Amino acid sequence: MPNYRDTIYALSSGRPPAAIAVVRVSGPRAGAALQALIGRLPEPRRATLARVRNPQSGEVIDDALALFFPGPASETGEDVAELQLHGGRAVIAGTLAALAQIDSLRPAEPGEFTRRAFENGKLDLTAVEGLADLIYAETDAQRRQALLQLQGLLGNRAEAWRTRLIEAQALAEAGIDFSDEGDVAVNVMERALLAARGLRQEMTDTLAGASRGERLREGLIVAIAGPPNAGKSTLLNRIARREAAIVSPYAGTTRDVIEVHLDLEGYPVTLLDTAGIRDTDDPVEREGVARAKARAAAADLVLWVVEASEINHRHPEARGGEAAEPRRVTGLSSFEAGLRPAPQDDVAGDPPRWIIRNKVDLVKDGKRVVNTDRAMCTFSVSAATGEGIEALIAALTTHAAEFFGAAEPALVTRERQRRTLEDATAALGRALAEPAAGREDIVAEELRLASRALGRLTGRVDVEDILDVIFRDFCIGK
């Protein structure tokens, strides 16, 4: 465990070189460190132009802006000093070397500034997780969700729940300990259970949207699957607008799963290019096929790519190149599809599948497939020429917006949050399952366990074992 009485320092801005570099110092000797570097202590919370010098040699390192934030009114709750320097590597290295010469200062560990803010009550654990998500957000939707968490969307709600739960717990315990007192109402246990029932319903409603918040952090997973040489890698490259996958006329070129991250109008989408699914004696390709099946089955959406001419050949009932039942176009063998056959109605557990009729540019004019219909989950494209790709991307964007939902922000965004809320809900359920009389002690204990679970959610109790896991993903200087 780091010693939180130490004064720590680190580069808190991006990788050099850059126009500006921010070096942050936090701890009891932050003011002394700043005074050693610039010769004075600036007025609190006011930017001051200062000449930064090496405290031992007196050599000038840079002209910079210096700021001092006395604790506890600072980001970490401690004294904090900042230097806004020119962002060259030599300037940064010289400043960090000068700080290293000052007694009782040491370099910060990853996430240590934020951890100190948590330890000093500036952030609760849900806000810390929101900050981590904000740092790594790649799309507008992820940024909005992370910022709401940082601002207390879940943490404030959890604290309100916990306050009400403590009140219910107090009622239950009053009914046990002071049942013979005249000023204790006879129906305190019923009031406690009524409060518990309302809380449990609110938490259950919150958990109903938990998967949406978790998936927004991870992104919509879209697997491109199908038989060999159907043009899957070419389609991936066309959608990604770059050469992310190797394209070859030889079957079995793609062996491992290739991932490409996309931003579709603010929604995160991870596109997977998988191996062509077929019988093979090549052990390496066979492993690729197995991985393709597993990733396709676990995806949120499968783009099943086949040649347009092959669809016409397999399905003579299609009129004018349009399949009468597009979902049945995937009614290949379960091995060939890598998934269970898709009937007209989706099978529970199967991801939805869109049929991508590729290589329409190679189909003769009389049999050319030109239909694109998102409602029927069929798209006719040419990955080689780009025909129909924009319509497919637009459909993917709409699907992502529908998948994540836009009506209400998700309160729960991480598995840890979901599991902790599930623990609290389960404890409340057990309390409500007890008879109204004769088991008051068990009801009170279950209410206590529910309150403790909510305390773990915000970081009030029993969190030491998970702090290292949370903060290890932060960058140094944050």
Image (tube, rainbow, N blue to C red):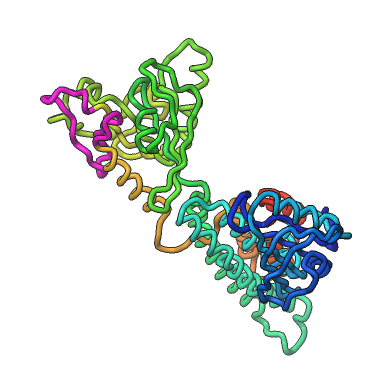
Of residues 241 and 235, which is closer to you in this image? 241
Q: Position of residue 49 (x, y in %)?
A: 68, 71
Q: Is residue 30 visible?
A: yes
Q: Which residues are magenta?
A: 360-387
In this view, the residue farthest toward the front is: 59
442 or 306: which is nearer to us? 306
- Among all residues in the image, which is located at the extreme bottom? 182
Residue displayed at 70% across by 62% down: 459
Image coordinates for residue 276, horizontal then vertical, percent: 41, 22
Residue at 70%, 50% (x, y): give it. Answer: 90
Question: Is any atom of residue 347 visible in this view?
Answer: no
Outermost residue toward the left? 366
Q: Magenta stretch: residue 370 in it?
A: yes
Above or below, comparing residue 7 to residue 228 in the picture: below
Residue 124 located left or right of residue 350: right
- From what the image shows, is residue 77 above or below residue 212? below
Is 268 displayed left or right of 69 in the figure? left
Q: Residue at x 25, y 21 (%)?
A: 310
Residue situated in front as seen by the camera: 72 or 410:
72
Residue 360 point in image, percent of width and height: 22, 28
Q: Quadrant of residue 424?
A: bottom right
Specify whether residue 412 is painted magenta: no
Q: Quadrant of residue 183?
A: bottom right
Which of 35/202 is in front? 35
In the rendered structure, the answer to whether residue 367 lies left or right of residue 17 reads: left
- So how many labels did they put on this image? 0
Residue 53 vs 399, above or below: the answer is below
| Quarter that holds the C terminus | bottom right
The residue that appears at 77% across and 70% down in the rendered structure is 79
Most extreme residue toward the right, as rendered? 103
